[in-house]
Amino acid sequence: MPGRTESNPATSVQSSVVEDVPVPQQPSAHEAPSTGAVPFVADADVTAPGQREPLVRPRPRSAAPLDAAIVNARDLIAQRRYAQAVTVLSHLFATPPRTWEPWFWVGTARLGLGQWEEARKALVEGIARDAAVPQLWVHHALVSQQQGRPGEALESLRQAELLAPKLPSVQLNLAYALETQGAMPVAVEHYRMFLALTQDNNAYDTMREKVRKHLLRVARH
């Protein structure tokens, strides 16, 4: 993640995340160079209650217990109650779930707890069950970045972009990943795409302001 300086749009991992999806919480032991870039964010289109429909529709509903556990876990994650979300989901893993949703949500909760390797394993299992869900790739990129694997993070985001180029978290995270690797002109393009995609979405107002200020600083240098 970017260095903690006065000029950074977000000065901690927690503040870097779109408010309605507060993951991850813990700072990485492998922080990116201090570029002043807007940091990685989790996907508001998946978990924000009351927001528009996600760009990728969930699978048809499964049995009621599965739905109840996932809905409960999603709400707990939105409240930053990650350990409780893991507990709520645990009974779904008596046998390995066949669908991607339990793996995604437990991976997201583990991400919030700073349990990078456990989060990675869960998200890889989710991808193995449905590699066409872009949010799985976005959160996999978050884990890769936290573990000091920027190239792998960028690869995951490129896969997410192929699946859902209009997902705001894809464009914002791509911008950050490219900037930390020194590809500033291309990063700016993705920052601008993020701003265009979120123009009428109040859930992104805080992050939009950070991006705008960051682009102004970039333009002055």
Image (cartoon, grey):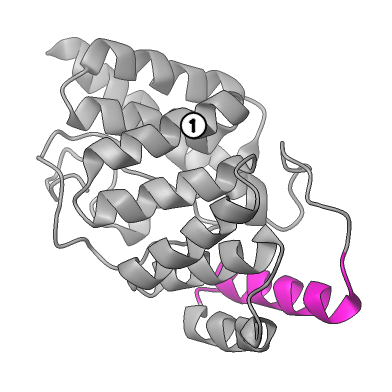
Q: Is residue 162 left or right of residue 212?
A: right
- Badge 1 marks a residue whose secondary structure is helix
- Amino acid type, mark 1: Gln
Residue 26 location, quadrant: bottom left
Residue 117 position within the rendered picture, expressed as x and y whole percent measured from the top left? 33, 68
Is 66 colored magenta in this rendering? yes
The answer to whether residue 61 is above or below residue 193 is below
Q: Main secondary structure of the magenta part?
A: helix
Q: Residue at x 10, y 40 (%)?
A: 33
Residue 156, above or below 23:
above
The boundaries of the magenta stretch are 62-80
Q: Residue at x 60, y 86 (%)?
A: 90
Side (left or right) of 90 relative to 41: right
| Image quarter of residue 202 | top right
Residue visible at 29% across and 33% down in the picture: 177
| Residue 139 placement (x, y as % from top left) | 46, 51
- Image coordinates for residue 54, horizontal then vertical, percent: 73, 42
Along the line of sight, which residue is nearer the eye, 91 or 190? 91
User: Is 76 on the left or on the right of 112, as rendered?
Assistant: right
Q: How many marks?
A: 1
State the residue at coordinates (65%, 88%): 94
